Image (spheres, grey):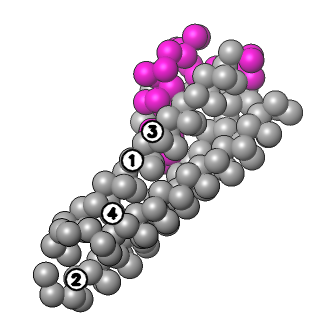
Amino acid sequence: MLTVVPVCLLMLALTTLIHYEALSWIARRLPALPFPSRFKVVVVLGGAFVAHVVEIALYALAFQLLVRLGAGALAGEPTLAFDSALYFSGETFTSLGYGDLVPSGALRLLASTETLNGLLLIGWSASYTYIAMERFWSRPG
């Protein structure tokens, strides 16, 4: 359990920084893009999507690391290949939770941390997208 707590804290910090930097980068460049306003919203959504994929991949790597350190396992995945870790991370991040892969041991703490973190980051993306839509849809073009 002691191994997982620092990993959870590190993941929270990393994903928050990644998300902040991604949305900041978009905000700085978006007004200067020579696209119609409607397309700028697509850029916002695409940028947020890429940030989420990177964050999900980082959690997948964290799951793999912790499985290798013996902190737990995913039911039915003794070695946890990256594609399975990525799949589990994506469904956990989005709180989809099919239940076909179930964490055991201390991995449960990382899974619950990822779910809460994912919900917060998705909410952040949604609010940012709303602000961008409001800004660019109120202008002609």
Disc ID at residue 44: 4
Residue 24: x and y in percent read: 49, 65
> Circle 2 — which element?
helix
Mark 4 or mark 3, which is nearer the start of the sequence?
4
Is residue 119 among what the camera can see?
A: no
**Mark 3 or mark 1, which is nearer the start of the sequence?**
1
**Residue visible at 23% across and 89% down in the picture:** 138
Extent of the magenta region: 69-96
First in sequence: mark 4 vs mark 1: 4
Residue at x-position 43% and y-position 22%:
83
Name the residue at the top extreme.
79
- Marks 2 and 3 sit apart, C-alpha to C-alpha, by 31 Å
Tag 4 near tag 2, CB within 8 Å: no
Q: Which mark is residue 50?
A: 1
Q: Which residue shows up at 58% across the image and 28% down it?
A: 61
Q: How far apart are labels 2 and 1 at the CA level?
A: 23 Å
Residue 93 image position (x, y, % from top left) = 50, 45
Quickly name the residue at label 3: 90
Q: CA distance from mark 4 to mark 2?
A: 13 Å
Are the residues tagged 2 and 1 within 8 Å (C-beta)?
no
* 33 left or right, relative to 5: left
Whether residue 80 appears in magenta in the rendering, the answer is yes
Q: Which mark is residue 137?
A: 2
Residue 36 at what x, y percent from top left?
A: 15, 73
Camera-nearest residue between 84 and 57? 57
**Residue type at the position of mark 1:** Val
For numbered disc 4, what is the local secondary structure? helix
